[in-house]
């Protein structure tokens, strides 16, 4: 009888403790140690912001930062990670903290010695506005959400050659990656889609594969498709040599532009179909390399930031880490 009483008391205590423990809230994805400063990890340099005016995307000015890891030496080509919406990607109190993640992973030799290039979208002005802080410049949608090679050309023909004047950047496409969140993610995908010879590893979080870039036909101007056309393009074209990490959450946006979570699932389905179709037809050539993590987050960088370290490990998994 005494044993039963003690057992009942113990069970009640456990139930009470469980009830007192805070329940996980949807979208709650804490950062891991890989995103936080670590003792003994050598500090790299974050240089900038600098301003850049493009001759390809005329009338715009943008800011950019360069992260140079402590392990970088000019006698050996470094990898390159380009990340969009640089002002948010580098926010030391935000969920991405990409430069800190790079610092930790390079130290662990989980990714190659890699220089980070963090770029804001362009702003239609003479000078980049000082009061934007984390807000979007006014040319973001025109650059990030369109299905064209214009942004890729600016990056590959202008930006990287300028960066290479100062740093020894590798031409090995396998040691390059490009990423972003939301419209920055679809922009990263577009660069790889248009120029897999220059970028073929993509980090995509809450990607805006939706109709933001769509424009209806007017007069003699044809209809302009939006990012929701990508699943069709993927299904109707031979696979390209692109590796992509996809993330999204079931509570992402649902608006006049589209349903973000469904759009990302359509991207995944299209990639799966393209590979299986090519296999059935015994087509020679590359296949898409992809993985995904779905969660219950909303349209923010929280889940993507928590996943970023492992995503970079996955993207660079078969590259030598000197």
Image (spheres, rainbow, N blue to C red):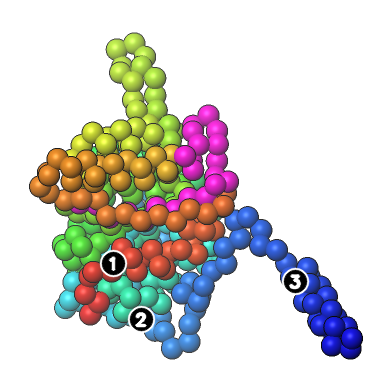
Determine whether the residue tagged by mark 2 lies in a helix, strand or loop: helix
Count of numbered badges drawn on the protein: 3
Q: Which residue is mark 3?
A: 18
Which one is earlier in the sequence, the residue at label 2 or at label 1? 2
Q: Which residue is mark 1?
A: 316
Residue 319 on image: x %, y %:
22, 70
Which one is earlier in the sequence, the residue at label 1 or at label 3? 3
Q: Is residue 65 left or right of residue 279?
A: right
Q: Quadrant of the C terminus?
A: bottom left
Q: Which residue is mark 2?
A: 108
> In 3D space, how far apart are the residues under numbered discs 1 and 3 (Cα atoms)?
40 Å
Q: Is residue 211 magenta?
A: no
Does 13 sit above or below residue 287? below
For the point 57% across and 63% down, which residue is it?
Answer: 29
Q: Is residue 251 magenta?
A: yes
Determine whether the residue tagged by mark 3 lies in a helix, strand or loop: helix
Magenta residues?
Answer: 241-262
> Quarter of the image holding residue 173?
bottom left
Q: Residues within 10 Å of mark 2 (few under 14, many from 20)?
A: few
Determine whether the residue tagged by mark 1 lies in a helix, strand or loop: loop
Which one is earlier in the sequence, the residue at label 3 or at label 2? 3
Residue 281 on image: x %, y %:
14, 40
> In 3D space, how far apart are the residues under numbered discs 3 and 2 (Cα atoms)?
37 Å
Residue 222 on image: x %, y %:
30, 18
For the point 36% across and 16% down, which residue is it?
Answer: 217
> Quarter of the image holding residue 170?
bottom left
Q: Residues within 10 Å of mark 1 (few under 14, many from 20)?
A: many
């Amino acid at each position: 009888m005494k044993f039963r009483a003690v057992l009942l008391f113990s069970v009640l205590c456990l139930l009470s403790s469980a009830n007192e423990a805070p329940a996980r809230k949807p979208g709650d994805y804490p950062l891991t140690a890989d995103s936080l400063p670590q003792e003994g990890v050598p500090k790299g340099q974050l240089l900038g912001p600098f301003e850049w005016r493009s001759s390809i995307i005329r009338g715009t000015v943008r800011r950019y930062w360069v992260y140079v890891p402590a392990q970088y030496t000019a006698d050996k080509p470094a990898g390159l990670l380009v990340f969009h919406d640089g002002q948010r990607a580098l926010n030391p109190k935000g969920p991405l903290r990409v430069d800190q993640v790079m610092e930790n992973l390079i130290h662990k030799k989980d990714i190659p010695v890699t220089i980070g290039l963090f770029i804001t979208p362009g702003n239609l002005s003479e000078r980049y506005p000082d009061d934007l802080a984390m807000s979007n410049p006014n040319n973001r949608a025109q650059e990030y959400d369109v299905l064209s090679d214009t942004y890729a050309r600016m990056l590959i023909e202008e930006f990287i050659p300028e960066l290479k004047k100062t740093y020894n950047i590798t031409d090995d496409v396998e040691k390059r990656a490009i990423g972003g969140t939301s419209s920055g993610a679809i922009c990263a995908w577009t660069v790889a889609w248009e120029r897999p010879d220059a970028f073929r590893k993509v980090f995509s979080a809450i990607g805006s594969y939706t109709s933001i870039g769509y424009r209806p036909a007017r007069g003699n101007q044809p209809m302009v498709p939006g990012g929701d056309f990508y699943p069709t393009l993927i299904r109707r074209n031979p696979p390209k040599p692109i590796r992509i990490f996809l993330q999204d959450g079931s509570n992402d946006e649902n608006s006049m532009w589209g349903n973000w979570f469904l759009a990302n699932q359509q991207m995944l389905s299209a990639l799966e179909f393209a590979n299986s179709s090519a296999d059935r037809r015994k087509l020679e050539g590359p296949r898409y390399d992809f993985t995904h993590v779905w969660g219950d987050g909303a349209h923010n960088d929280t889940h993507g930031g928590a996943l970023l370290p492992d995503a970079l490990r996955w993207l660079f998994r078969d590259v030598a880490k000197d």
